[in-house]
Image (cartoon, coloured by chain):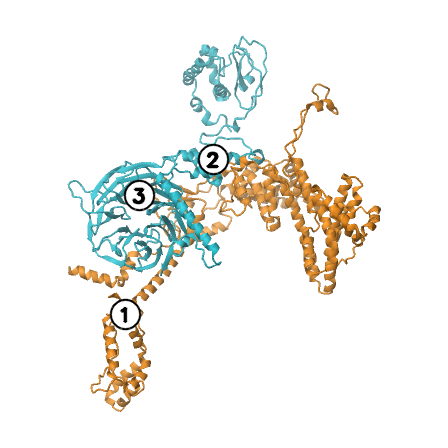
Chain colours: A orange, B cyan
Amino acid sequence: MTANRLAESLLALSQQEELVDLPKDYLLSGSEDEGDNDGEREHQKLLEAISSLDGKNRRKLAERSEASLKVSEFNVSSEGSGEKLVLADLLEPVKTSSSLATVKKQLNRVKSKKTVELPLNKEEIERIHREVAFNKTTQVLSKWDPVVLKNRQAEQLVFPLEKEEPAIAPIEHVLSGWKPTSSMMPVPAPCPGNPLGSMGICAYDIRASAKLLNSSLLPLLPYRYHKVVKKGKAKKALKEFEQLRKVNPAAALEELEKIEKARMMERMSLKHQNSGKWAKSKAIMAKYDLEARQAMQEQLAKNKELTQKLQVASESEEEEGGTEEVEELLVPDVVNEVQMNADGPNPWMLRSCTSDTKEAATQEDPEQLPEPEAHEVSESEGEERPVAEEEILLREFEERRSLRKRSELSQDAEPAGSQETKDSSSQEVLSELRVLAQKLKENDQSRKQKASSEGTIPQVQREEPAPEEEEPLLLQRPERVQTLEELEELGKEECFQNKELPRPVLEGQQSERTPNNRPDAPKEKKKKEQMIDLQNLLTTQSPSVKSLAVPTIEELEDEEERNQRQMIKEAFAGDDVIRDFLKEKREAVEASKPKDVDLTLPGWGEWGGVGLKPSAKKRRRFLIKAPEGPPRKDKNLPNVIINEKRNIHTAAHQVRVLPYPFTHHWQFERTIQTPIGSTWNTQRAFQKLTTPKVVTKPGHIINPIKAEDVGYRSSSRSDLSVIQRNPKRITTRHKKQLKKSSVD
Amino acid sequence: MQWPPPWRRSPLLSASPPPGPAKEFLRPGRVSEAARLYSHYVTPAEGAREGRWQTRPSLRPASPTNAPQQPPLANVCQQNYGAPQDPVEPAGLRSASHVTGSSLGKAEVSCGSRRRWAELVPESSWSPAVGASKMKVKMLSRNPDNYVRETKLDLQRVPRNYDPTLHPFEVPREYVRALNATKLERVFAKPFLASLDGHRDGVNCLAKHPKNLATVLSGACDGEVRIWNLTQRNCIRTVQAHEGFVRGICTRFCGTSFFTVGDDKTVKQWKMDGPGYGEEEEPLHTILGKTVYTGIDHHWKEAVFATCGQQVDIWDEQRTNPICSMTWGFDSISSVKFNPVETFLLGSCASDRNIVLYDMRQATPLKKVILDMRTNTICWNPMEAFIFTAANEDYNLYTFDMRALDTPVMVHMDHVSAVLDVDYSPTGKEFVSASFDKSIRIFPVDKSRSREVYHTKRMQHVICVKWTSDSKYIMCGSDEMNIRLWKANASEKLGVLTSREKAAKDYNQKLKEKFQHYPHIKRIARHRHLPKSIYSQIQEQRIMKEARRRKEVNRIKHSKPGSVPIVSEKKKHIVAVVK
């Protein structure tokens, strides 16, 4: 059954398609139809019948495939003529008759109109409606974005959100409440249109208040009033003095002296320093109050002015600077400092804060980033110190490398003589490599010279023939110095060499060189390599490798080699990593060794005093020798440092994975290391640090957020009125239902 | 500054000194008390008071009359209250301070002016034991300004140096405090408050009173509606509202009436107050519908409510026909909720696994998202207009931003059975979910795992849950006819807190937050006892999940790179979004 249905609908579909395409096909079918048989027509009819069964009765053009007498006036077809029927053709005969003018006009109008497009189906329309509505709603909702974001990030949210409106008293109320304490204080004039007592503010009022604000009148509240009075007095005195000078110069002189004396007294007293009661209170307030800070600065300025020595015109700038310094010493730090970072009531925290900012500034350089954290760690755990040292060393190394690179870049930048520069640069590379090898070797040599017997020296030297050969080359420095930077670098390197590796150019070495050139040298070398002990592996191996590498470089000179050379050069540029490592290891070993305890008490049981030392016997007696610790795990591993200080018991309490919001471990460490308790913080800081994220009032209903709460204007139209204005949306189905129900 | 400060003056002295007799009448009683207790001993405070007494010049004129009248007292408490017993005694010393010496040679020092503690030479003309020998007493010098607060409301002054170098063990100490706070939190975690029993069938729906925190309404599966008073923990009214289930209940925004829908195809409006004496319990309005209504919700501001069943209908309270009805698809809709912020928005979830959003103003559905399994209810965030959470049959909850339905903002998983109901905390930071696994869980909005799980032995499948409007309590109605009241914060101390308690609470909270990542603290904070059924279910599902994950990983590993797409957990459960 269903299959049948399906077939039908399919047929109908095909039929539809045919119908759609009808105008095109018509021409062909029309011409063919002349000689067509009835079977075809029957088939067509059948199809039509089937399609009508589908329920969707579409309007179809009635087709005529044969000539008939009955021609419908509504279905005019141009069948048989082989061309499309045009309206103009029909109008042709009407032209002549004038009685049909109105019809003609109508037809003309029809001609100009286009056919209306097929309406979209219902689903499509609904979908479009939905999409439009959704976009509209999304827009409406997007206004909440900032509010939501703010609330999510808020340090503290206090519920219920509705706040009581702060009662802002109108200005006349405030003014009427205030009474002038002296005649000098201004009395606000009542505005003409609006008597003082009346409610509301008129435009005049506002303007007047603005004026008040601008002029110096408003600040004349009692505490400022005296200041103004004082100033006025001073001015008056000055004026009087001027007059006196004109009238009676002698008296004026006396007056002047008096003034001078007053100034001197002032200078001697500490009145305007910040040691007074007032100043101290201000200094405390300065932390929180901008005004107090200002007052303080003012006072200091005054102090400076007063205490300034009346000097001769030739006052050196240096001295000025000196006084300034003194002044600055007098000013408490908070006055200047707190302005930058106002939050941070604990001065200790503050200090660390500033250092943090410094750190942050330095952190722009990625290479330098690990340094401060390492430092921090070192503060907390002593065991990490070597790491920090290494960091520093690495950084130095990095710096040097970058310096070198820059110089190279500058070399590259030089336009002329590129070939030359290339050559020279390669030469430079080579020479540097040699220098490095040389250094390493010599380093080793010098150590060995100290440690081992003299007999071994020649053997070791015999091992490395090549660098020895290059020595004169090195001394001469054949490469041209191309740029200024290079010159600098040269100097650097030279001094570096001079400082660290005083090159032992020995006659013996020179004499030893001749046997090195003998053909049997390689064999000997092999033997020696086998003899190298594990301890000295690091120091001895690299030079020997180099000695092999250098001649091959000279011979091969291909690109790869050069690259490698470059790499090696970069890796070891100007820095003795291996030596540093060894040194570090030695330090670590030293540090891990248990220490002796000296319990001698000077002066106990014998004479004591300045210059007297406890006797050796006593010292020996009270010195507790530390027991030999267990052997280090890295005793036999020359290129490894194993830290034996790690404590498993504490590790159980430590965070192993960096928690989510943090991107770097030092951030996390910093948050942990900042205490929040009142034991380590001032009360205010403690309160600030422990503010809960969400505060609710017990017994208060928390209503959902409203647009008015956050300052948005909610739409004045109610949702209900909006629906009632679009009644069209009651669906047809529902209408039917309603009808049915009413019938019932 | 005046000494003594007003609050330390005894009431006797603080008043302006009455001349002569009145004071004399008052004084002996007080002194004799002290005298009886400490016949040879005067506490420093007492002494100080007395000394002060003496230093007050205004009182001095009264004293000469005092001494002769009270000779026995003056002998017992060997102190002269400003009265020169011995006319030879120099006045200056007396006014400065006093030393009382007992017969045993003990010396007690009382201080008149507070800065004169250093060395005192007693002039003990009155003490025969000590005689004329001079005694030197060295005392510590302390300034009360440094340790006495001005009023008792002030903070105690604690001299302290906050230099961090002096406190090397800040972190370990705070760590221990945090550990203790976490442990205490677990110790005090007793969330269950009360059980409201009275229903004779499973509780199917709950509603909060919008204006009264103590009132709660509940509808049961036998058609009964009960109104409860939470403070008294009893039922204040019972209404037989429907035949069959009460499918939905909601209160009007003003709190004067409430609506119920039931299996009997009716919507009824009831007055919140009970009927007067002699009146019958009758609904205000009854609307007979064509089909069963499965849920109801009231508009947050206007006299409009929405029901759901075969379609979402929006009703004007005054009319018996819906003013608008919206359909999309043909399956029955299980719940409908108005957005509390943008009140014209509605969300509904249907049994054909989808969540549909509607706009009441434009009277059209907006969008539909189809999930893996059916959603039982949704709840809008009351603080964030576009966020809602859907409680799904696949044990998870999905928080959506309604503007981007193709990916949920967060998938909350922890339940081990279908989630039946969800309700937001009024602060919008957390929500509570009720599940068929006989537990309720509290999820932070931005976390995928729950922070708390509540269960009791007797609580069966939890059908409905509500968070009270003050965000302090949670109510849940379950199959076994009880409504349970829980604390939203399990270890919270109820009632009014003193400021110190509050400070300690805040500090502990912050400590817990600060050290929450530390393994020991984390373990303690996360530890919950669970019923065996849930526990074993969790284990089982963990294994299943792991197996599925492993398989997926293997599939990805062994197929051509890129051919097996990696689908995130969030996207995995979304089938489609229909515009």
Cα–Cα gap, marks 3 and 1: 52 Å
Q: Secondary structure at mark 2?
A: helix
Q: In the rendered structure, the residue with mark 3 lies on which chain?
A: B
Q: In the rendered structure, the residue with mark 2 lies on which chain?
A: B
Are the residues at dot 3 and dot 2 in contact (C-beta closer than 8 Å)? no
Q: Secondary structure at mark 3?
A: strand
Cα–Cα gap, marks 3 and 2: 34 Å
- Kind of residue at disc 1: Ala
The N terminus of chain A: image quadrant: bottom left
Discs 2, 1: same chain:
no
Discs 3, 1: same chain:
no
Q: Which residue is under mark 1?
A: A7
Q: Residue B377 at x, y = what percent?
A: 32, 50
Q: Which residue is under mark 3?
A: B462
Q: Secondary structure at mark 1?
A: helix
Discs 3, 2: same chain:
yes
Residue B281 appears in view = yes
- Kind of residue at disc 2: Leu
The image's mark for residue B179 is 2
- Kind of residue at disc 3: Val
Q: In the rendered structure, the residue with mark 1 lies on which chain?
A: A
Position above or below: B46 against B209: above
Seen at 67% across and 38% down, the residue is: A587
Q: Residues within 10 Å of mark 1 (few under 14, many from 20)?
A: few
